[in-house]
Amino acid sequence: MKLTLKIWRQKNAQAKGKFETYTVEANEHMSFLEMLDVLNEELVNQKKEPVAFEHDCREGICGACSLVINGQPHGPMNGTTTCQVHMRHYKDGDTIVIEPYRAKAFPVMKDLVVDRSAFDRIIQAGGFISVNTGQAQDANAIPVDHDVASSAFDAATCIGCGACVAACPNASAMLFTSAKVAHLNMLPQGKVEAQQRVLNMVKQMDIEGFGRCSNITACEAECPKGISVTNIARMNREYLGASLGSEKTA
Amino acid sequence: MSWFTKFITSSLGQKLVMSLTGLFLILFLCVHLYGNMQLYKGDEGYAYNLFSHFMTHNPVIEGIAYLLYAFILLHAIQGIALWVQNRRARGGQGYAVKVTRTTNTNSFASRNMAFLGLLILVFLGIHMGDFWWKVKFGTTPMVTYEGEDYQNLYALVESSFRIGWIVALYVLSMVGLFFHLLHGFQSAFQTLGINHKKYTPVIRFLGWVYSIIVPLLFASMPIYYYFFK
Ligand code: SF4
Ligand code: FES
């Protein structure tokens, strides 16, 4: 199949970018990223600069691949990362517009690559457990209700890809942050630092310049891992509880 | 900064301000609507004028009225501030192809809360100039019931709702209010942290019912007076 690609090209973080149009010959068995590999091979052969895009595992688990494809982060299918989108979902003659994530907290570094280190700093602010949790426990030694374990696991499936920010009209990072807060705060080992965790992570999220959630739910619609906005409600109430309830006055 | 300032100026704190003031305004609309329904009594404004007299002369209600003005301002100012911050967070360069899918709220309403809110704010300015200002500072016609003088607010209503553009503005604003509430009602609960398997479906349903019924009844009044009186 012959495809027309409109791709955002930008030399570096300072440069002004613009769309360039390319044509590429792909087949339906290729993944989206393989299709871009084909394009890049051609560009290299023509002694042109290949298109920079991020990828790592290519099996939907690392969250490195990003890309906004025809206006949707991770492309047209629900619950799928860019690397798992296959060309069978496109047909001969299609035009595909490929843009980087757009958010002030995710500045474009080059072409389709954005700097997502803001997420790392949110994790550094509280996405860990620093109390001693002892040796690896025997199975069921720590009682955790089955539903709680499932919800915590669902939250833990967030791969930190940032599609929630890219999709949100407010560029809010609430879905990501709330998933990380929920995942740790629901489990016994995480409960010890629960209040401080939510306060610190929200604070860092604000410092990074992400927007304020207005419950549009575009994040939930585009999240490749189906992270639910119920996590945001949980974070709202934990933040409220921690702010009003904790004894810390400063 | 004190813990409270930190809390209330954080992203989540600001959202909480929107949620709480919004819920208060939702309650207020019920009271306002109850008053307006007196117009349909068919008694040439007797019940309506008595009710508005009560609402403007009871000291407790007057106290609450000042709270209401403060909350309206707070809701508007905080809303605009959030809108500005969110635009900034989005950054200068927008998407060439725009798609916003949502999962469980009205996409148009949720994306345009600020504009819908501004429409309602402009409406509120005109509406308050039309009634509130005249009652408080202007001259209203008077009417006598059982030997006592009352401000004849009913006469104001009748004369205002005879003017075509006012009727059009009121109806348009109520359409705006419908969309604003459609997202705002349930959004207020989500922001409060209430998202629950048992209660959220009920909240959503109530939100729908409220967003349709309340603006519809408000809009029915100018329409009734313009076309059928
Ligand atoms: S919440 Fe979903 S969209 Fe956001 S970073 Fe995690 S996996 Fe990606
Ligand atoms: S490359 Fe790892 S999730 Fe796509």
Image (cartoon, coloured by chain):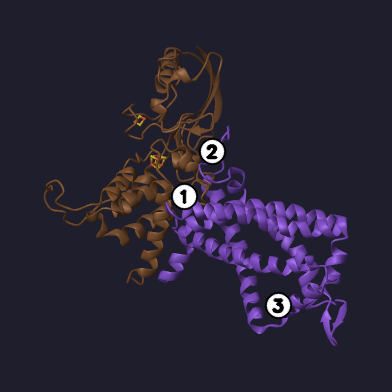
Chain colours: A brown, B purple
Q: Residue at x 44, y 70 (%)?
A: B4
Q: Is residue A155 above or below residue A5?
A: below
Q: Mark 1 packing: few (<14 Cα in 10 Å), some, or many (20+)?
A: many
Q: Please tell me which residue lies in front, B136 or A104.
A: B136
Q: Position of residue B96 (x, y in %)?
A: 58, 33
Q: What chain does badge 3 belong to? A: B
Residue B101 tag number: 2
The reply to whether dot 3 and dot 2 touch (C-beta < 8 Å) is no
Q: What chain does badge 1 belong to? A: A
Amino acid type, residue under disc 1 in the picture? Phe
Q: What is the C-alpha distance between the residues marked 1 and 3?
A: 44 Å
Q: What is the C-alpha distance between the residues marked 2 and 1?
A: 20 Å
Q: Which residue is mark 3?
A: B55
Q: Is residue B163 above or below residue B44?
A: above
Amino acid type, residue under disc 2 in the picture? Arg
Q: Please tell me which residue lies in front, A138 or B42.
A: B42
The reply to whether dot 2 and dot 1 touch (C-beta < 8 Å) is no
Helix, strand or loop at label 1? It is loop
Residue A139 seen anywhere in this rendered image of the structure: yes
Residue B114 seen anywhere in this rendered image of the structure: no
Q: Quadrant of residue B78?
A: bottom right
The reply to whether dot 1 and dot 3 touch (C-beta < 8 Å) is no
Q: Position of residue A197 (x, y in %)?
A: 32, 57
Residue depth check, mark 1 versus mark 3: number of the one nearer the observer: 3
Q: Position of residue B63 (x, y in %)?
A: 63, 80
